[in-house]
Amino acid sequence: MQYKKMKKKIKALGIMNGTSLDAIDYTLIEVSSDLTHLRFLKHAQKRIPKSLRKKLLSCANNETLTYDLSHLSTELGQVYGRHVDELKKSWTWDIVGLHGQTVFHEGKRSTLQIGLPHYIYKSSPKPIFFDFRTPDVTFGGEGAPFAPIFQNQIVKNLKLKHSAFHNLGGISNLFNCSSKSLLAFDTGPANILLDAWMNEIKLKSFDKDGKVSQQGLPSPLVVNNFLSHPYFKKRAPKSTGREDFNLDYIKTWGGISFKNLSFEDQMATLTEVSALSISHSYSELKVKPKQIFFYGGGVNNPYLMSRIQFNLPSVEILLSDEIGWPSQAMEGATFAFLAAARYYGIKVHLPKLTGAKKQVALGSVYL
């Protein structure tokens, strides 16, 4: 679908809140009509109200009735609308790309992101593109990861040699780009287990700066127990989420041995699970990257980053900030880019990365 009076360059606002449920990212980028010109403009992060976060978490844990789900999608949409009201005082944009909040995801079968776009349109009547994952799932894809679609254009623009991009959100995913092939998949947990256990034991949403985790020592035995989960043995393309990695996973796969550890050792152990699952994923690649650009909330956890570097000693660990894309803005920028592609009528879908049977246009539109 293309639109009348299309500009050669547009400003696209991307809205993203991930598995961690900690905040909503708003990223403004500039995109040309052929998608080759990409420029980061602005980023803002808005906190999700505590009461709403609690309800979203219950919903993601399959504890919400259908009536409540409807109210919740509306409430989240209203929060988006209020945030957009604030942003439009100093920002301007032409279109919006809305990811929404994933409350269920099962690759190749079903995916659900909630948060009504109508309240955004009420505050800012511009074309809104949303529901990006369903078209991929419809044609047999995992519905994830999608960031590599955007990152592949960055690689082309900057003429990067063999590199990888890695997201440390609730879930960890990689995009490995070489001259011979592209490969992307979810590696497993990044912050999700740490956040879940911190909330369970200390009623806090996350381990700030990894201070608790770095005071402990990981248990190799318990780490191996966690890594015996069947997801880690699956081959790409693959995707995962809170459905696999949650409190039940911690309690079941950690067992008595995990329960008997001190809290600090438990957190260090969960950190090692994330770090090792990430490093193992790279060790399985036929062609390994020379450098990895990390982004997402996990880059603010020095202990997690140090464990990743320890387990990948021959790879240069960098942040996406170093190539002009702030690490906290990357996911929002992804959906701004996907919205721009849909606006200009360009198919950017990479079915080889998701396992979809054909290339499709991603996203529905609200006008």
Image: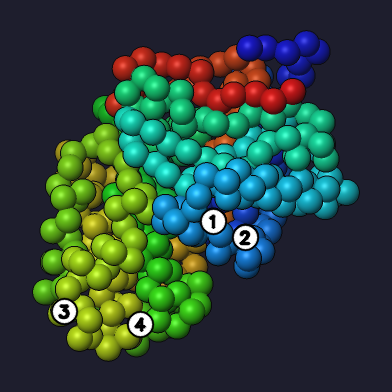
The image shows residue 71, relative to residue 49, as above or below, that is above
For residue 214, the mark is: 4
- Disc nearer the start of the sequence (3/4): 4
Which circle, 2 or 4, is nearer the viewer? 2
- Disc nearer the start of the sequence (1/4): 1
Taking depth in this image into account, of 239 and 43 the one nearest to the observer is 239
Mark 3 near mark 4, Cβ–Cβ under 8 Å?
A: no
| Image point (56%, 59%), residue name | 55
Q: Which residue is mark 3?
A: 256
- Distance Cα–Cα, label 2 vs label 4: 31 Å
| Image point (19%, 66%), residue name | 253
Residue 177 position by quadrant = top left
- Disc nearer the start of the sequence (1/3): 1
Q: Residue furthest right?
A: 89
Kind of residue sitting beneath label 4: Gln
Q: Which residue is mark 1?
A: 56
Kind of residue sitting beneath label 1: Leu
Left or right, 246 with respect to 79, comes to left
Give the structural element (helix, strand or loop) at label 2.
helix
| Image point (62%, 54%), residue name | 24
Residue 32 x, y percent position in the rendering = 67, 24
- Distance Cα–Cα, label 3 vs label 4: 22 Å
For residue 52, the mark is: 2
Give the structural element (helix, strand or loop) at label 3.
helix
The image shows residue 241, relative to residue 57, as above or below, that is above
Residue 246 x, y percent position in the rendering = 34, 61
Dot 2 crowding, Cα within 10 Å, few <14, some 14–19, many 20+: some
- Disc nearer the start of the sequence (2/3): 2
Mark 1 near mark 2, Cβ–Cβ under 8 Å?
A: yes
In the rendered picture of this protein, how many numbered marks are placed on residues?
A: 4
